[in-house]
Amino acid sequence: MNDIHGLAVHAAGAQLLPYKYDAGELKPNEVEIKISHCGVCHSDVHLIDNDWGVSKYPFIPGHEIIGTVIAMGSDVRDRTVGQRVGVGWQADSCGICEWCLQGDEHLCAQSQPTCVGRNGGFAEKVRVNSRFAIPVPDALDSENASPLLCGGITVYSPLRNHGVRPSSRVGVIGIGGLGHMGIQFARAFGAEVTAFSTTKDKEDEARQLGAHHFVNTRDTGALKKVAGGFDFLLSTVSADQDWASYINALRPKGTLCIVGVPPSGIQLQAFPLISGQRAVSGSPTGSPRDLHEMLNVAARHKVKAITERFAMSKANDAVARVKKNQVRYRAVLAN
Ligand code: NAP
Ligand code: ZN
């Protein structure tokens, strides 16, 4: 038996309970990782609650993993035992489709998420295809870096792919796990950065993280005041928003990019898009290539998550704080 112990959820919205599964033989392309840290992403909470209808119980959540390679399958040549690696949302892909072959494995139709139909990182160990175990630069501390593996790449990729540059005016909507890293990366791209938040007392920290401006979205009329002000808006919020006002906050040719998952989708009027040649887009996490690049950028520009550390056994407390929007700014479980 190759038992792996962790904390699993057995039904929608239930508490995490001690759990073990037989991981079987190590596959030729897999590495086994001894987990030191795992961030608690809001997507874990959506999966625990089955908000997206894709959860398969029981399962171990967790997809912001850092640990050490302790075993390698017979075909693995690109990692070494003892190497520190990180794993994000994706654990495997087909490796042979158009998207995998051009380095966009995150767009593969056979993509395997780390904790959907598999068991993730709220555990002592995890196994993934070695291509998805990304070496972590020495300059990064494991606790502060683990949230980069999902939250960090999810905000880094759209900034990069939409060509954000020093002349760009960027707004980050929702200053939680993703948003607080989004401010730092947008600043690293050289942009003028505005934080949009429902939490007034995040203003000082948002400015310390690099925001030039702060908009309290609970203030009536706040969004009207910034109409026509942004080249790129990145929404990390998992709640319904006043999308029309955010579209109006875009400059001509501006883009609103959605990475948070609002429950009712996004309602749009055509004219503000047509007349200002504006766009709305979405963005998933990112490929292994982008993860390598993002971790190196984080190391060079000192981008890191502000964390609240919990012992792995206290994962239920961490999840409860995420649900109440109390975490500043990412809960990380430590073994
Ligand atoms: P989080 O840490 O809980 O942060 C979300 C932030 O949204 C909160 O801190 C809060 O910021 C704001 N917010 C919460 N409730 C709100 C409300 N009712 N109205 C307006 N703002 C509200 O969550 P996260 O881990 O950053 O994840 C955010 C979302 O991104 C989730 O839906 C998650 O599933 C999704 N996600 C997507 C991808 C992807 O691939 N696209 C990857 C990872 C995560 P303020 O206090 O500043 O208002
Ligand atoms: Zn995530």
Image (tube, rainbow, N blue to C red):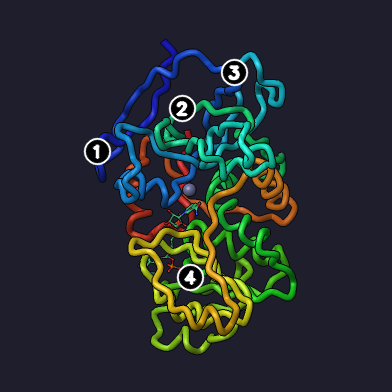
Under circle 2, the secondary element is: loop
Circle number at residue 11? 1
Residue depicted at x 59% and y 51%:
153
The residue singled out by tag 4 in the image is 202
The residue singled out by tag 3 in the image is 71
Look at the picture and state if 281 lies above or below 8: below
First along the sequence among labels 2 and 3: 3
Under circle 3, the secondary element is: strand
First along the sequence among labels 2 and 1: 1
Look at the picture and state if 141 lies above or below 274: above
Is any part of residue 290 visible from this angle? yes
Look at the picture and state if 216 lies above or below 136: below
Q: CA distance from mark 2 to mark 1?
A: 22 Å
Give the number of the mark in front: 2 or 1. 1
Instruction: Confirm or reject: label 4 Cβ below 8 Å from ligand 1.
Output: yes
The x and y percentages for residue 42 are 41, 52
Q: CA distance from mark 3 to mark 4?
A: 43 Å
Q: Nearer the viewer, residue 307 or 289?
A: 289
The residue singled out by tag 2 in the image is 124
Residue depicted at x 35% and y 42%:
54
The x and y percentages for residue 200 are 44, 76
Horizontally, residue 310 falls left or right of residue 89, namely: left
The x and y percentages for residue 28 are 59, 17
Image quarter of the N terminus: top left
The amino acid marked with disc number 4 is Lys
Under circle 4, the secondary element is: helix
Picture quadrant of residue 192: bottom right
Instruction: Confirm or reject: label 2 Cβ below 8 Å from ligand 2.
Output: no
Under circle 1, the secondary element is: loop
Q: Nearer the viewer, residue 141 or 276?
A: 276
The amino acid marked with disc number 2 is Glu
First along the sequence among labels 3 and 4: 3
